Amino acid sequence: SGKYECKVENQYGTHTAEINIEVLPPPTTQQKLKDFDLSRGQEATITVTANGTPLPPCIWFHN
């Protein structure tokens, strides 16, 4: 993160172009997940809140 500048010059003068770059932090989740047991046929809802810019999708994988 920070301010960067490019300076060009020749015998006729100089010019500077500036840009600010912000490195965003990696995505996070708000809560820790806990293991639980289910019986066959039993349903469960697992909720996860993701944070990040841009907002990341939550993709579930099994095994």
Image (cartoon, helix red, strand yellow):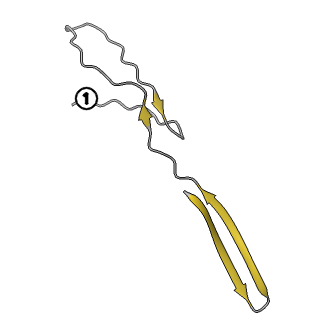
Looking at the image, the residue that sits furthest to the bottom is: 11
In the displayed structure image, the side of residue 2 where residue 41 appears, left or right: left
Q: For the N terminus, give its image quadrant.
A: bottom right
Establish if 6 lies above or below 54: below
Among the 4 quarters of the image, the one containing residue 2: bottom right
Label 1: how many Cα within 10 Å (few below 14, some 14–19, many 20+): few
x, y percent for residue 24:
51, 47
Taking depth in this image into account, of 10 and 42 the one nearest to the observer is: 10
x, y percent for residue 36:
24, 14
Q: Mark 1 points at which residue?
A: 62
Q: For the C terminus, give its image quadrant.
A: top left
In the displayed structure image, the side of residue 9 where residue 51 appears, left or right: left
Establish if 58 lies above or below 4: above
Looking at the image, the residue that sits furthest to the right is: 12
In the displayed structure image, the side of residue 5 where residue 53 appears, left or right: left
Residue drawn at x 44%, y 39% is 27
